[in-house]
Every structure is written in structure tokens, then in C-alpha cells.
Image (cartoon, rainbow, N blue to C red):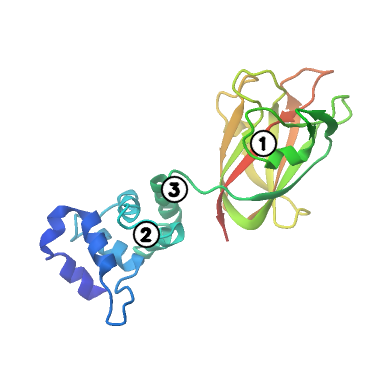
Amino acid sequence: MGEMMSSTTSIPFLKAGPTLLATALKSVTTDAGTPAYTSGEIASALHSPGVYGGLSASELAQVLYAPSLYPGFSRGEMADALIATGIDARAARDAVDAALGGPPLLKLVEARASSELPALYNRKPQTADRLIEGPNAGGTFWNSSLDGSDPSPWFWIKLEQTSIVRMLTIRWKAKDGHVGARAMKYDVMSSIDGITWSATGLDQSTMPGLSPERGTDVLPGWASPTRFIKVSMSESSYAPPRAYFTCHYVLVAGEPV
């Protein structure tokens, strides 16, 4: 690595830009035909103060995402490459997310709720299964009990794999201002086994300017590995006796561990 670092500073086409340099380094092969430099080594070269003044994490991610390189470098390789230069792991993941348009969505495989409605709406029951079906233009949703028997309902969703959650999106209503009973108070908890739950530190206070008309809450992630996510609600935007809760779907973004 030291030889490459010293040689890159004298390459004539440095003036052409870091993407061209990275593309050139990626194309170099050994006598056996294998890549001569790993993504980490290329990133370290570009991060060196002697090369382009040392590119930042976001600049490195943009270079590694260049069409001439990507999908040659996977999302994981891009993050590992940045981490290999000494960049903080979270900053590296954030930079890759920014380059690729956000963290990837995780597959949701199961959902359950403390109460739900078997009655059909748009030919589907208003049950917890609706929570994991993804965006649906507001046509289907989960509803808690309408008779006041479950004033503090909860639902949980299960991820296909244990993951680090980077972003949680809860679509309470079809759209902002749309008629619908959203949660005005709630807590988000995580679990590995669906039995023992830990606080994530996220609740309605995470959403500044929360109002009954708001349709979607986009929450940040948390550090602990997670397989189950539970949302416990305690106050509806509808006043009693109509104090039930509605949710169209939940999206979870992050990466498996």
C-alpha cells in the first residue's frame, strides 16, 4: 500500500480527477488476472493528504459510486473501503447512503398487533399483515379495535434478518391532512427474540412539529442489532369514544449484521 500511495502522487492524469484515478487503479490486475488493489486500498490512496488534498468521506463515496466503478464496488465494499482509511464507521455508512440515495430497505416477514379488525376494506382485512405490504396508495391499512377495548395498542414487525436499523418510516395516514387516526404518543422498542424488548429512545418527541394532520413519521435508527420492532401507542388523534389507531405501512432501512 505504501508503494501505491507514493506512486499515485506522481501519476500525470491526477489532474483529470479522482474518479479517473480510481477507475485506473481498479483496472490494474496482477499477472494472475486478479485486481491488484482492493477498494480499501483505492480509497486510502484517495484519502491521503498527498492526493487531491485528501478526499472526505462523502467525496470518497461519490468517487466509488461513479458509473465507471459501480456496481463493481458493492455497498458493503464501499463502506469497508472508507472505514479502512480510518473514517468512523457511522460516517462511512452515512456517506455511502448519501451516494446511493439512502440505506436499503429491509425485508419484513411478519407482523402482529394487540388488536385488529377482520372486516374487509378494499378486499383486505384491516389486520397487522397490512403493515408489511409496503406503500399502497392508502388503499389498505391496519386498524386497532374500534370499540375502545384496546386504548393502548401495539404492533410489532419482524425483519427477515437481524439488522442495524438506520431509518424507520411509519405511514399513519394515506397523506398529510387525510382523515385518519394516527398515534400522537408512542414508543419504539427493539428486540432480538420478540420476547425481551429494549428502548430505542425514539418516540413522538423525535418528530418536531407533530400534529394530528401529519401522515408520515420518519425516525432515525439506533445502534443495537434488531430483529423485531415494536410500536406501542397511548394517544390517538381521535378523541374518545373514537380513539382508535390506524397505520398504512411501515418501512425499515438498514443493513443485516
Label 3, on which residue?
A: 97
Cβ atoms under marks 2 and 1 closer than 8 Å: no
Check the image and report above or below for 115 versus 19.
above
Dot in front, 2 or 1:
1
In the rendered structure, which amino acid carries the disc numbered 1? Tyr
Q: Which mark is residue 82?
A: 2
- In x, y percent, where is residue 193? 74, 57
Q: Residue at x 33, y 56 (%)?
A: 64
The front one of 236 and 73 is 73
Front residue of 256 and 34: 34
Name the mark nearer the viewer: 3 or 2.
Answer: 3
At 27% from the left edge and 82% from the top edge, which residue is drawn? 31
Q: Residue at x 65, y 54 (%)?
A: 226
Outermost residue on the front side: it is 123
Task: Please name whichever residue, 243 or 72, is drawn nearer the observer in this view of the structure.
Answer: 72
Q: Looking at the image, tell me whether mark 3 or mark 2 is earlier in sequence order.
A: 2
Can the viewer see residue 144?
A: yes
SS class of the residue under badge 3? helix
Q: Residues within 10 Å of mark 3 (few under 14, many from 20)?
A: some
Q: Position of residue 61 (x, y in %)?
A: 35, 52
Task: Name the mark nearer the viewer: 1 or 3.
Answer: 1
Residue 48 can be seen in this image:
no
Q: Amino acid at mark 2?
A: Leu
- Marks 1 and 3, Cα distance to the nearest angstrom? 23 Å
Q: How far is the residue under mark 2 from the one under mark 1?
A: 34 Å
Q: Amino acid at mark 3?
A: Asp
The residue under label 1 is: 249
Image x and y of residue 97, in percent: 44, 48
Residue 166 position, x and y percent, is 54, 47
Q: Quick check: 172 left or right of 220?
A: right
Q: Quadrant of the C terminus?
A: bottom right
Between the C-alphas of marks 3 and 2, the distance is: 12 Å
